[in-house]
Amino acid sequence: MDLAYERLADRMHVVSLPLATRFRGVDEREVALLSGPAGWGEWSPFLEYGPEEAARWLRAALEDAELERPALVRSRVPVNATLPAVGPAAVAGVLARYDRCRTVKVKVAERGQTLDDDVARVAEVRTLLPDARVRVDANGGWGVDEAETAVRALERFDLEYVEQPCATVPELAELRSRLHRLAIPIAADESVRKATDPLLVARAGAADVVVVKAQPLGGIRAALAIVAEAGLPAVVSSALDSSVGLSMGAGLAAALPALPYDCGLGTGALLSADVAEPLVPVDGSIAAGRVAPDPALLAAHAAPPERVEHWRARLAACLPHL
Ligand SMILES: O=C(O)CCC(=O)C1=CC=C[C@@H](O)[C@@H]1C(=O)O
Ligand SMILES: [Mg+2]
């Protein structure tokens, strides 16, 4: 693999994509795209991530640009709708962006909001989609007691699982034993993708499901290995990627031997511009093939020169960590 800074920087295109709905505190998503012999890879660690963590995302992008993807066992991947922490009045409008998704992931525990806000949002989803599978994602925002209270308040909406209710593995384990009788599974996301040991949460018996994301875990192959070793059902998700990054997630999901849950790869619907024909859900699923950016769209959404400089400096800082 050619890791010379100058040549990588020359292959890198940085774009800034506007969001249709504010998500994760941002209205614009900056992503870097790299071309290589096998296709295009996306490198889009969130802006606040340091070089060591961002280097894992870079490894994934380089692998996807350099190597052919593992063999696919399915050609389409069923996806969930992802609902940011909006008020009840905005729920129908956001869900309308996802074509026929039978599963909705609802963001909860948003900073500055209350459990009542979460209940109102989930209740609205249930009213609009009585037959949907509904999961919630707290991004580690609750302590154990708070999480128990919240899950008991949300239980009546029939939850598929609760994703990363608490921040740490011991907290997840404690909550899991408390929720045992409710039979609501716990999914681990940050405890997999941000952990020094992504398998610890599985070994500790602290989760029922692992959420795996190709970029943060260092690529499709690394993520496949983690799923195999964790021995738990896996959900593939994304990181608010452009369609190029979403296609990497789809390549992972389509290569997994079992895919019991709909994947968090429908977030293309949250973008109001993309680098290619948007990879958005059609009849509840997305295609599993590669996506290459359209040069005209790369140009139209090119980030300003000072942001490109920022990403070049980031690239230089990450290379020693590869
Ligand atoms: O899993 C999904 O439905 C979509 C992806 C998603 O929710 C996320 C994308 C990007 C950053 C994260 O805060 C968030 C997540 O926690 O899963
Ligand atoms: Mg999550």
Image (tube, rainbow, N blue to C red):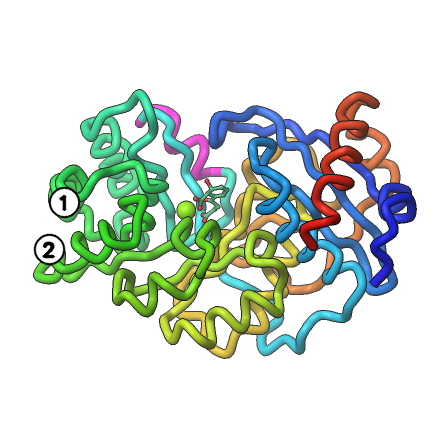
Relative to 10, say whether 287 is above or below. Answer: below
- Extreme residue in the left direction: 181
Name the residue nearer the viewer: 108 or 74.
108
| Figure quadrant of residue 235 | bottom left
Relative to 269, say whether 284 is above or below. Answer: below
Q: Amino acid at mark 1?
A: Glu
Q: Can you give x and y, in whole percent of width and height, for residue 286 in the image?
A: 59, 58
Relative to 229, say whether 2 is above or below. Answer: above
Q: Where is mark 2, residue-wise?
A: 178
Q: Residue at x 46, y 70 (%)?
A: 227
Q: Can you give x and y, in whole percent of width and height, for residue 64 in the image?
A: 73, 61
- Extreme residue in the front direction: 320
Q: Residue at x 11, y 45 (%)?
A: 152
Magenta residues?
Answer: 88-96
Distance from disc 1 to disc 2, alpha carbons, whole Å, reads 8 Å
- Quadrant of the snapshot with the N terminus: bottom right
Q: Can you give x and y, in whole percent of width and height, for residue 141 in the image?
A: 30, 36
- Left or right: 25 in relation to 122: right
Q: Residue at x 36, y 41 (%)?
A: 139
Which label belongs to residue 128?
A: none
Q: Can you give x and y, in whole percent of width and height, for residue 54 in the image?
A: 62, 44
Q: Residue at x 66, y 56 (%)?
A: 247
User: Main SS of the magenta segment?
Assistant: helix
- Quadrant of the snapshot with the C terminus: bottom right
Which label belongs to residue 148?
A: 1
Name the residue nearer the viewer: 312 or 290.
312
Name the residue nearer the viewer: 164 or 317.
317
Label 2 residue SS: helix
Q: Amino acid at mark 2?
A: Arg
